[in-house]
Amino acid sequence: MNSPTTTDPEPGPQRAIGSHGRPPLLQVDDLRCHIPTPRGLLRAVDGVTLTLERGQTLGIAGESGSGKSILVRTIMGIAPRAAEISGGVHFGGVDLRALSVQKARTYLGRHIAMVFQDPMTALNPVVRIERHLIEGSRHHLGLSRTAARAKALELLEQVGIPEPRKRLRQYPHQLSGGMRQRVTIAMALACDPELLIADEATTALDVTVQKQILDLLQDIQRERNMAVIMVSHDLGVLAGRTDRIAVMYGGQVLEEAPTAALFARHRHQYTRALLSAIPDMAQPRHSLLHTIPGAPPDPVAHGSGCRFAPRCAAVLPCCTAEAPNLQPADDPGHRYACFAPAGPIPQEQP
């Protein structure tokens, strides 16, 4: 099959230029993804605003059902077909939502790539690894089959897969879970993207392989100066691997801050509850793990107040009557939406 030669689409409406003479790599403005259901409108993403600079790593944290995955899929333009999308998504100044379907596919495939949670479902079981790796670079970069195959070998070596020539001839079921995930990372890197989105990319792996994959993503990000969005339900995974963290709940961002500030001086009660749920190895054996009472909110039947109020230990009367807006904290770049912000965590005396 002949591969069409592609060019980047003409940019849409431009964003404001920053102090460095160019716009942020990614600007998300009041993004909403509402999905009609028989029960009513499911507000999967409900007014998210985020900014990501070139070379930065943004973590998106929250429980299952908080809207993390549907947010990055909406950014990528792969939200459910029936979804009602509103808000802005600009990438390097290009208005992605203003592009036609064909132009969006061409542009996103070249500039933004995603690593999905389950590599077995992300890979076609009846297609050899070689074809998975060469199709993207042939289509988007216009490489010949020989050049694309050479690039595929380099990528497999870069992601630490032994005997890369042998692996090219194999099928996904012939590889271990960790190796399959490395293949999906190689696929994502094939077109040299400026932004890599890792959507729970290590959840299905054991802890040893999980650390290897996380270290690999971090090394590649530094080598290529890529921007990375790392989605995880585990704040411990994001600690030390991200520049900023946005905490999501009920389809909204409840707190966003530089990673160090979030861990040391978080303000939202939900952030504190998530941090408290991280197992503490210093606790005596058989100590009970901290859990967050209740269940995540029904995305169809949201009330008028704070969506975390029914589960919050510090809830106030105003929390159930009115939804708080994001407001700046004392730390630069730190914002939170809470009427009863958490105070400093008491430090244990040595």
Image (tube, rainbow, N blue to C red):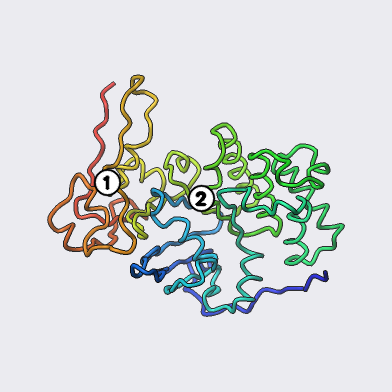
| Mark 2 or mark 1: whose residue is earlier in sequence | 2
Quadrant where the C terminus lies? top left
Which residue is at 67% across, 38% downward? 176
Q: Amino acid at mark 2?
A: Met
Quadrant where the N terminus lies? bottom right
Which residue is at 34% across, 57% downward? 250
Please tell me whether mark 2 sits on a helix, a strand or a loop.
strand
From the viewer's perspective, tell me whether residue 304 is left or right of residue 198: left
- Please tell me the numbered disc located at residue 149: none
Q: Does the residue at mark 2 contact the one at mark 1 (Cβ under 8 Å)?
A: no
Q: Amino acid at mark 1?
A: Gly
Determine whether 56 is above or below 302 in the image. Answer: above
Which residue is at 27% across, 63% downward? 302
What residue is disc 1 on? 294
What residue is disc 2 on? 230
Numbered label tally: 2
Which residue is at 19% across, 63% downward? 322
Query: Is residue 255 something one can see in this rendering?
Result: yes
Query: Is residue 20 something one can see in this rendering?
Result: no
* Callout 2 crowding tier (Cα within 10 Å): few <14, some 14–19, many ≥20: many
Residue 32 is drawn in which quadrant? Answer: bottom left
